[in-house]
Amino acid sequence: MDIKTKKFIVNELRRATIRWEGRRNALKSARRKVIDETGKAKLHWQCAKCGLWSRDQKTMEVDHIIEVGEVEKSELIDLINRMYDASNLQVLCQGCHRKKTAVFNSMLLYQRKKRPL
């Protein structure tokens, strides 16, 4: 399988995780009900990294604790198994998710530069 086809398949699998039950369960486990001053119950979600609570689920992102990894280096079935492993999920606020992703991407870039030609 050529790399372009493989990347296409992996991108479609990533999009499908949005509707995946494992993602919903991760969000459900990171939430709690809070009674506001008017007596109404509202849901809040907690970031697994910084511990802050958010009133808006849209500011929370479900992330893989151990990164799925590079498409080029992995077999497709291994990528799928890592991508759809519910025990490898955590809920992060957008700030923590951005930082984690930036660190991972800079490590990848560093490793690519270190490779011998």
Image (cartoon, grey):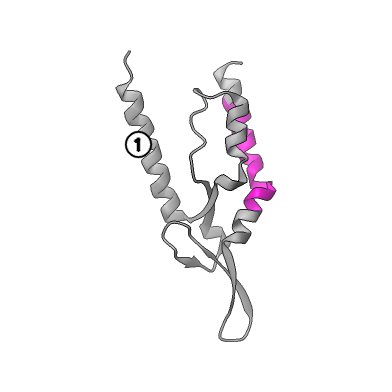
92 over 54 or under it: above or below: above
Looking at the rendered structure, the kind of residue marked 1 is Ser
Residue 47 place in picture, x, y as percent? 48, 60
Q: Which residue is drawn at 59% across and 69% down?
A: 32
Closest to the observer: 17 or 8? Answer: 17
Question: Overall secondary structure of the magenta stretch?
Answer: helix
Quarter of the image where one finds residue 36: bottom right
Q: Residue at x 49, y 23 (%)?
A: 73
Residue 117 place in picture, x, y as percent? 33, 13
Residue 97 place in picture, x, y as percent? 45, 50
Residues in magenta, as a range: 7-24
Q: Does the magenta stretch include residue 36?
A: no
Residue 2 place in picture, x, y as percent? 58, 16
9 over 46 or under it: above or below: above
Q: Residue at x 68, y 47 (%)?
A: 19
Closest to the observer: 117 or 74? Answer: 74
